[in-house]
Every structure is written in C-alpha cells, then in structure tokens.
Image: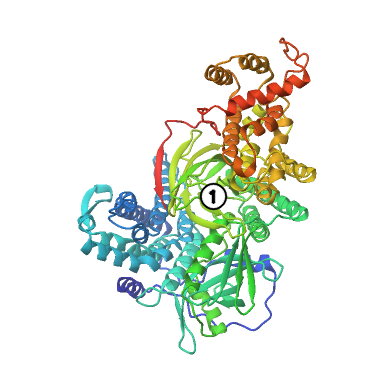
C-alpha cells in the first residue's frame, strides 16, 4: 500500500518523532502485583515531548487556538460528508447481495465497507462533542464571561482512545481496493456507481465528484493527519491550561498508534526474527488467562503462526513500555473449543463480586457529585483511580465464558471472558489461521516479545471507568430489548440469541433468550431488560444449540446506542447477523439508578396469580411456561408417556426453586434436566396457581356449553367464552393448546393422544369455584368434576381453527422500522 507509506514519509518530513525500538527485556524479577502493574499504563502520564514553540503571550496563543479548533471542526465536517457518501450505496448493495443477480456478493460488500460505519460513528461523536464545546465558548463570549476556559482535551483523548478502529480498516484496505477495481471492470452497474460519487464540501455545500476508490482512501489520509492536528493544537495551548496534559497524552497515544501501524508498503504489522522468519500480528487484546488455575489479566498477541501470551511491564515515565513472556502455542494443529455453558460462581465469589459492584456504584455516584460541585481535582483523581482498580478486579474475576486451547504437544490453555462476543472474535481469528497452518518455525521468544510494544494495536485494558469524561449520549437507566424472530437459517435448528451491553458493570450485562423450537424461522418474542450506566453499544449473537456437541455462533452484530434516538416507545429494527436476520425492538427509559442488588431476580413465579407474573415480566405468557414448552418441543416430543410419566420430586422441586429465584439460571438448568422433570415443572406451575388458568367464573358456563349437541356450535360458544378471560389467561391457554396439539401429532411415538393429554391437563387448567367465591351454580360431584375438566379441554383440543397466541405485550405498531446490515 504505497499511498500509506507516502503519508508516513510525509510525517517524517514534518519531524513527527516515533517511538524508539524496544529495548531488550530486562531479566530482573517481575513483581506479580496484578492491579498496580496492569493499571500502570493507565496512569503512566505523558511522555517527555520536546518543547513546543510559544507565541508572544497566552492571549495570542488562545486566539490562535480558537482558530485551530474551528479549522479542525470544518475539516471534520468535510470528512464526515465523505464517509457518508462512501456509505450511501451500502444498504442497496446489501439488499442486492441477497438476490439471484447481486451487484456484489455479501462477502464483497463486507470487505469493501469493513470498519467504515464504525469510523463514521466515531468521528460523528467527536464532531458533535467538539461543536458543542465551541458553541458553548461562543455563547460565553457573547455574555461577557471573561473567565471562561474552553476545555476540549477530553474530547480529543476520547477519539484517540478509539483510533484502533483504523487498524482494522488499514489491514483490510488493500483487499477492499482490489474488490472495487475488479468489480469496476467486470460489473457495469457497480462501474456506474464507482466512477461518480458526489459529496458536499463542508459549510459552503459545494458538490464534489469522487471515484469510489478515492473515497476509500480518505480514512488513510485522515489517520495520518491526527498527530499533526494534535501537534498544532498543543502548540497553541498554554502549559497552565487545563487541556495541556490531556492533549499531551492524546498526542502520545496517537504517535504510538501511528508508529506501530506499519513499517512496510503492505501496511502489515510484522517482526523479523534472528533467522529471517517474518511474523505478522493479526490481532491483540487483553484477556483473562485461567491456565494455571488462577486468573490473571494478560495481553494476548495472535501472529500468523502462533499465539503469544504476555505480561505487561511498565518501566517508568518517559521510557519504553515492555512485555514479559508468559506462554505461547503454535497454531499448527491447535484445537479451539468454545464452551457455551456459563460457569457458575460459587456463593463466596458471588458475594465478593457483589461487594465490588456496590463499591463501584458508590464511587461512581461520588464522582458525579464532584463533577457537579466544586473542582476537587485531587479527590476526583483518587476516586477515579480506585474505580479503575475495582473495575479491573471485576474484569478479571467476573468472566464466565471459556475458550479452551488444545495443542498437539499437550500444552492446553484456557481463556475466560465476560463477553461472549469478544470471545467469539478471538475464536474466529484463531480458527482462520489454524486451518492454513501446517507447521511453525520455533520463535525467538525474546525478540518476539520485545516487539509487542511496537506492534500492539491495543493500548490498555477495556476499562469503562478510564474514559475521562461523561458521554452525554450514553444510556443511564433501563434498556429493554425484545427479541422477536429470526430468518435466513440454512436448515432447521434450535437457536437462541445472546445480548450484551457495555457500560459500568454494576449490574448484569449479559442475557440470552431461551432456545427456540427446532425450526427454520425461530420465534421468541422475549423481552430482556438491563439496568445500564454509560452504555454505548449493544451486541448480539445468534447461537445454534446442539445436543452433545459444541454450540455454534451463526452470526454476530453490534448496535450503537444513542440516548437521543431511543425513548419510551419501542423502536423496531432488523439486524443481519451473518446469514441470519434477527428482528428486535429497543426501548429506553432514563432514570437515576438504584444500588445493585445481590440477586438477579426477586419476584417468585410459582403460587402467584398469572396476571401478576405477566405484569412483572412484561409478557402475556409467563417465561416459565414458554421455557418449559420450548425445551420439551426441542427434545421431548418423542418421549413415550410425555406428561403422563412423572419426573422425580427432587428434580422438579429444584427447578421450581431456581425459577423462583433466577430465571437465567433456570434456562441453563432446563437444558440438562430430565424431560419428565421439565414436564413436571410445567404441570406443577398450573396446579399451584391461586386461581386456575380458566377462571372460576367460567366453570358453570362451560358445563352448559357441553350440553350443545352440534359440535361446531359448541366450539364456537367455547371460543366465545375465552374472550372474557384476562389477556394473560387467554393467551397462555391458547399457547398450551397449540403445544398439546403438536404433541398429539406424534402420538404414534409418544403414545399421547388428545384424550390422554386432556386427561392429564384438565384438572390442572380448570377447577370448580370454591365455596364463597361466587359459586352461584349447582354443586358438582367430585366424580363429575373430573369428567367436566377432561371434556372441556378435549373439546378445545379438537378445534382446528384456534386463534394464535400472543406471547409478549404488543409493541407500538407505528414504531420506526429499520434494517441494519452488519
């Protein structure tokens, strides 16, 4: 990629210093103080930059600084317009990719636009924040506030902390250009698009024509200018200004990224070893290593032929950071296994994590108060550092998802993470390289580990509390995510959707739907609620569940969260997760947060009126009913005597207890429970309802309907009676009826006919009213009571045109519909 090398050469002519070559690792004893060592990169301070030229006096510097900032804002507006123009055809190309005559294939579309939407979002956030600060400064000047100090350093630091997004774009750039050139010559429709794209040029709105390839080059040009922009801004910022230290840190990070981005014309992160072997860095990041039985945060580097695990070592202010070797495994023959089941924390660990989260919440509230009150800089700094320390401990010890690495040499390692999304990204990256690796040259570990400082793309652990300022667009309150359905499966499967949010980890940040019935078009209509503070991103994974084998991630996607675009009304959209499209709705309610609770669920569901449970869960059919039914339809339809054969009392009681305390854990336990125990829990739920599913006041009306001789007239009357039921009762009853009809379709195997099912469920769903509960009808003999219960349910089961059941409360029909391709 000669164009990028030219840009780097240009920076050299502008006297932009780059980091020195890494020193050889010292052989002194490395102190294993995890918190202090790992936090050191966060508090290393600024590097010793050369003195910048000063203007005549601070007033002139500040005037010049304002001019520089306005120029940066204008430049950002132009750049955003170019990115928007580049992204304009993306949606149409994605839609075309799914047709029989695509303009570009889905893989080509993904290659061409790789990381461009994320870069657009990052710079849009930067532009809006900078514009707001400058508008505030202008308003202050108009009002005559002479003491106002324009602070923007945190805005630049936030942008630079996300500059790693350019790493992926740069690595993919050559592939994207090749696709554009190839399709420009071979596809007439794309040629017409690619040779003339029009963009508005900033504030004057003049229109400029670009080729597709020229627009694709714009991000490369932009990232090389970041360091120059920061240098110009720092030159006009007095040393005593509140922005000076922050801008120095932003400049240091920008230089570090730029110097490590690439050193050859192909823009590859490579290191040459003593024997001439060249290795390219494909991915790096912080992970939790649990290989030795104890957890430790490590920096993991994935090269073209091996995986290197290192420990960060900070050597002091102004000096080169270093890494110490921990372990490595060759990729040749490496088996990667993702363990889908979450590891359950012990009660002691759960209590410790809750204590840490409570401390984080308290510190966060204190920081907010300090920001609104007096400028207690020293107190704020100490509180923020303590908050980072606690978040680092949570990052290390709250991880529950496991990625197991099995080497042919017998060296096995386990990585754990709190994010299934991030773990899947690691699995994908490793798997791609292992399929092509047949052997490896033994590495020069000293040189390879030393080079990590220069090659790294990730500067620090992903701590939310290290963000210097509040993000006004982030979410604080309750985020509701309703997962409706999916389409695009290549074959029938049992799938579930895993949802993750970011932000401060005061509360649970992951949840997943129950597994769907074996189907090509799964439906969930399940609502997941998150308490969030500082949330900016929503991540989703669609996972196929397979008995006896590892679960498989079918696709994943991320959504940017913006408090301005979300509100109390449901917003419906469709996301592309690989080849699967998932339809969901989002709703957000901003409010002050309560301290974190030590339990994930406090409301019991057994022995509670069904209307109360439905209201608590925001559904029409309680989760306990849906989870049991879908688990039975997934693996119990061929079970002989389903619902007639009872499970063990101990297993049923255990499942009942966990449904009353923690729904998420209950969903996990259902997967491994005996089929008869699952069916027993479902029957027990209906038996223990304070009022039966068919309300007491309908019992005698149904008896009278049974006297109607004409079957069609009887069914019409019975369906009419259902309309008087409360919504949760009616829809749950219809849901069960449809399920029992599906069970009877396999009666040749499970021996459960409609009459058998009516005999089992009739007494649980329908009961005569008790004395004093509005019993104005004739008394029913106990023997006749059972007959009535069975006959009523049998009649309903014989109906071929039962209304469909709704499982969730209806969302706004006029909610905005969007389709997002990831």
At x 40% / y 47%, what residue is drawn? 820
Question: Quadrant location of the N terminus?
Answer: bottom left
Inspect this view and state whether residue 43 appears. Answer: no
**Which of the 4 image quadrants contains residue 386?**
bottom right
Q: Position of residue 280 (x, y in %)?
A: 45, 76
Inspect this view and state whether residue 303 appears. Answer: yes
Q: Nearer the viewer, residue 702 or 201?
A: 702
How are the colours assigned in the image?
rainbow
Q: Position of residue 19 (x, y in %)?
A: 47, 75
At x 44% / y 47%, what residue is drawn? 575
Q: Look at the picture and state if 136 lies above or below 448.
A: above
Q: How many numbered marks appear? A: 1
Q: Position of residue 317 (x, y in %)?
A: 57, 72
Q: Position of residue 619 (x, y in %)?
A: 58, 33
Q: Nearer the viewer, residue 693 or 608?
A: 693
Image-based side of 450 in relation to 678, left or right? left
Image-based side of 630 in relation to 677, left or right? left
Q: Nearer the viewer, residue 93 or 142?
A: 93
Image-based side of 150 in relation to 348, left or right? left
At x 63% / y 31%, what residue is drawn? 614
Instruction: Identify the secondary structure beneath mark 1.
Output: strand
Please give the residue where the numbered disc 1 appears in the rendered image: 495
Residue furthest bottom in the image:
275
> Few, some or many C-alpha atoms within 10 Å of disc 1 (few <14, some 14-19, many ≥20)?
many
């Amino acid at each position: 990629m000669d164009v990028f090398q030219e840009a780097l050469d240009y920076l050299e002519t502008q006297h932009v210093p780059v980091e020195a070559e890494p020193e050889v690792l010292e052989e002194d004893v490395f102190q294993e103080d995890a918190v202090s060592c790992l936090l050191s990169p966060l508090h290393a301070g600024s590097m010793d930059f050369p003195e910048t030229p000063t203007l005549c006096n601070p007033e002139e510097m500040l005037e010049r600084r304002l001019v520089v900032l306005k120029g940066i804002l204008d430049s950002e507006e132009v750049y955003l317009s170019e990115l928007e123009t580049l992204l304009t055809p993306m949606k149409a190309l994605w839609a075309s990719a799914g047709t029989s005559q695509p303009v570009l294939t889905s893989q080509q579309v993904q290659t061409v636009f790789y990381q461009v939407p994320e870069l657009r979002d990052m710079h849009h956030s930067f532009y809006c924040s900078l514009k707001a600060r400058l508008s505030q400064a202008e308003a202050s000047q108009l009002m005559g506030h002479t003491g106002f100090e324009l602070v923007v350093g945190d805005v630049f630091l936030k942008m630079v902390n996300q500059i790693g997004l350019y790493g992926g774009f740069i690595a993919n750039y050559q592939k994207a250009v090749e696709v554009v050139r190839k399709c420009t010559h071979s596809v007439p429709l794309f040629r017409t698009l690619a040779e003339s794209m029009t963009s508005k040029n900033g504030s004057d709105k003049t229109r400029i024509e670009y080729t597709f390839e020229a627009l694709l080059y714009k991000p490369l040009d932009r990232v090389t200018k970041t360091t120059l922009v920061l240098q110009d801004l720092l030159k006009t910022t007095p040393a005593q200004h509140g922005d000076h230290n922050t801008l120095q840190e932003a400049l240091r990070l920008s230089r570090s990224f730029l110097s490590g981005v690439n050193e050859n014309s192909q823009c590859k992160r490579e290191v040459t070893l003593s024997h001439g072997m060249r290795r390219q860095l494909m991915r790096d990041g912080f992970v939790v290593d649990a290989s030795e039985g104890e957890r430790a945060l490590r920096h993991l580097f994935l090269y073209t032929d091996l995986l290197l695990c290192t420990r960060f070592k900070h050597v002091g202010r102004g000096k080169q950071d270093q890494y110490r070797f921990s372990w490595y495994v060759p990729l040749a023959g490496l088996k990667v296994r993702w363990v889908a089941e979450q590891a359950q924390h012990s009660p002691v660990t759960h209590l410790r994590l809750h204590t840490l989260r409570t401390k984080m919440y308290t510190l966060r509230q204190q920081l907010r108060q300090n920001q609104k009150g007096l400028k207690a800089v020293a107190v704020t700094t100490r509180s923020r550092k303590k908050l980072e320390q606690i978040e680092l401990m949570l990052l290390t010890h709250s991880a529950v998802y496991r990625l197991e690495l099995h080497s042919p040499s017998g060296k096995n390692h386990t990585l754990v993470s709190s994010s299934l999304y991030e773990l899947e990204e690691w699995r994908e990256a490793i798997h791609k390289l292992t399929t092509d690796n047949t052997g490896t040259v033994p590495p020069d570990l000293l040189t390879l580990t030393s080079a990590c400082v220069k090659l790294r793309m990730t500067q620090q652990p992903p701590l939310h509390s290290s963000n210097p300022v509040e993000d006004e667009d982030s979410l604080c309150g309750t985020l509701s995510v309703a997962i409706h359905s999916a389409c695009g499966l290549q074959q029938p499967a049992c799938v579930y959707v895993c949802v993750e949010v970011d932000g401060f980890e005061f509360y649970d940040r992951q949840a997943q739907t129950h597994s769907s019935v074996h189907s090509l078009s799964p439906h969930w209509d399940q609502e997941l609620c998150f308490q969030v503070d500082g949330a900016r991103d929503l991540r989703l994974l669609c996972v196929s569940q397979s008995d006896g084998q590892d679960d498989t991630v079918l696709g994943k996607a991320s959504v940017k969260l913006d408090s301005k675009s979300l509100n109390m009304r449901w917003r419906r959209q469709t996301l592309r997760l690989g080849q699967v499209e998932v339809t969901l709705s989002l709703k957000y309610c901003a409010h002050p947060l309560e301290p974190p609770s030590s339990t994930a669920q406090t409301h019991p569901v057994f022995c509670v009126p069904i209307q109360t449970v439905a209201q608590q869960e925001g559904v029409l059919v309680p989760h306990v009913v849906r989870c049991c039914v879908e688990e039975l339809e997934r693996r119990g339809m061929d079970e002989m005597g389903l619902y007639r054969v009872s499970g063990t009392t101990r297993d049923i009681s255990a499942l009942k207890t966990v449904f009353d305390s923690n729904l998420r854990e209950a969903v996990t336990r259902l997967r491994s429970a005996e089929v008869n125990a699952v069916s027993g829990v479902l029957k027990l739920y209906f038996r223990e309802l304070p009022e039966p599913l068919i309300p007491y006041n309908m019992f005698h009306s149904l008896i009278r309907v049974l006297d109607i001789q004409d079957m069609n007239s009887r069914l019409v009357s019975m369906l009419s009676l259902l309309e008087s039921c409360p919504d949760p009762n009616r829809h749950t009853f219809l849901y069960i009826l449809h399920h029992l009809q599906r069970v009877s379709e396999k009666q040749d195997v499970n021996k459960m006919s409609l009459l058998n099912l009516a005999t089992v469920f009739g007494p649980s769903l329908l009961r005569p009213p008790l004395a004093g509960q509005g019993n104005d009808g004739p008394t029913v003999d106990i023997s006749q009571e059972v007959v009535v219960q069975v006959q009523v349910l049998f009649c309903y089961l014989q109906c071929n045109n039962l209304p469909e059941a709704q499982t969730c409360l209806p969302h706004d029909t006029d909610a905005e519909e969007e389709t997002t391709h990831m």
